[in-house]
Structure formats: C-alpha cells, structure tokens
Image: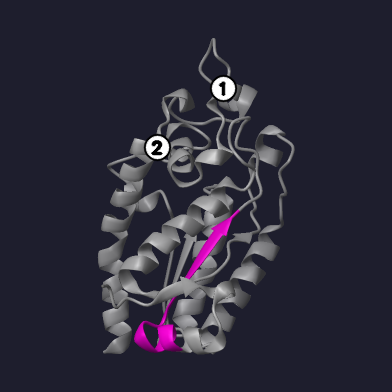
Amino acid sequence: MSDIQWGAYELLRPAQIESIRSATPIAYLPWGALEWHSYHNPIGLDGLKARKLCEALAQETGGVVLPPVYVGTDTIKPFKGFHHTLEHKIETVKALCTEFLEQLADEEFKVIILVTGHYGKVHVEAIKETAAAFAAANPKIAVWALTDAEPHEGFFDANHAAYGETSYMTYLYPDTVDLSLLPADRVATLDEDGVWGDDPRTANASDGGRMLTVFVEQALPKIRQLLADVRG
C-alpha cells in the first residue's frame, strides 16, 4: 500500500492538510479559463484538464491540489469572437496569481506547481512572469509555472479543442464530450468552429491516457528535484 499522502485541498480537514504538508510540502495549483472549446467540449475544459493532471502528479509525489482558478486572459473571445467565454484583464490574472503564491507560501508550502491548461500567449506570459518575480523575491520557495503542453513537447502538439484536448477529455471526463456535435462533412476549423489542431473527430480515450502518462513521466523529475532542493 502506498504511503504517499495527497488530497484535494477543499475536501481536507485542517489536520489532514498539516499531515500532508509535513510529509510533502507541495501545493499544486491548476489554472484555466472559462472558454469556448467548440461544440463538443465543455466550457471549463482548461481547468478541468489541469486539475486532473495535477492530481496525477500529486498521486506520485504527495501534496495538495487546489481547485482550478478559472481566470484567463487572451482567450478565444477577443481573438475569434466566440461566446460563452469570460475574458479577464491581464492585471487581474497577475494579481490573482501573486496572491495565490503569497497565500500558499504563507501556509508553509515550499514547492508550488502551477499548471495552466489555457495556452493564450499573453495569459501564459502573465502567469510565468508573475511566478518568476515571486520566486526571485522568495528564494526559499520553489515555483514552477507551466502549461500542460510543455511536458508533451516532442510527443503531442499543443492544440485548442482538437484531437489532443478532446482525447484528454474523452479519457478524463467522458460524459462531457459529444463528438457527434462536430461537423460530419469537414474538418473543424479555428474560424468556423474554434478548433486549432488535428481533427478532433479522431480523439479517443486511449490516446488521452497515453498523453496523461507522458505528461506525468516528463514532469515528475523536475518536481522531485525542486522538492529535494528545498529540503536541502
């Protein structure tokens, strides 16, 4: 039986948080956006995906997983005009990111892993710049901010509502995906459907599981090194 302690932060009692933090002072912070992911995927895809990836990492390392933060900028709404999307200011993203990092450090977590499932360039830059500034000002806290696509580099391509993200959702949240809603007579496009990447009609749970395995295998070594570094 595994002796790794981990849990969803909002479901834990105080003594449970303290026990997990004492064993492994890692906090995982999933980040997303409420954003159009075409007809066949849920609006909360980015945060839902990031949450499950953080949980998969925590199961290997220990630590706590916070609820997803659904505050994104540089979304598909101003880019292509798709509705059902909430676009926030860059300053809002940076301020919230700073406050989450400060609060997690105040709660005595020594390693903070922020995984953003939303890839908007400006959004990613805002998250990473804020994390870097916080880390520079707090050298005893290890911070790694990354997109979920980064550990996939060389294995799977970054995408929006296409084969990759849809395969993830088909594996992680099968009840939220309906491929029958995609155009049957053509490949979905960014302009018409809000899909960027390979044909989502080819998405499947098996490939979603393979993507999760690659993500965890590629991300784990750095996280373990960060934990070793803060422990001295």
Can residue 100 be seen in this snapshot?
A: yes
> What label does residue 180 carry, if any?
1
**Is residue 192 on the magenta stretch?**
no
Which scheme is used to colour this image of the protein? one colour
| Residue at x-position 46% and y-position 56% | 52
| Residue at x-position 51% and y-position 89% | 15
Q: Which residues are magenta?
A: 19-32
User: Is residue 199 placed above or below 41 in the rendered structure?
Assistant: above
Residue on which disc 2 sits: 205
- Comes first in the chain, label 2 or label 1: 1
Q: Residue furthest front?
A: 1
Which quadrant holds the N terminus? bottom left
Contact, mark 2 vs mark 1 (Cβ under 8 Å): no
Local SS, label 1: helix
Instruction: Tell me residue 128's x, y (percent).
Output: 49, 63
| Residue at x-position 45% and y-position 80% | 136
Which quadrant holds the C terminus? bottom left
Q: Residues within 10 Å of mark 1 (few under 14, many from 20)?
A: few
Location of residue 10 by image quarter: bottom right
User: Is residue 157 placed above or below 152 in the rendered structure?
Assistant: above
Location of residue 95 by image quarter: bottom right
- Taking 181 as reference, is 214 left or right? left
Q: Amino acid at mark 2?
A: Ala
**Is residue 29 on the magenta stretch?**
yes
**In front: 106, or 216?**
216
Q: Amino acid at mark 1?
A: Ser
**In front: 45, or 19?**
19
User: Is residue 138 placed above or below 202 in the rendered structure?
Assistant: below
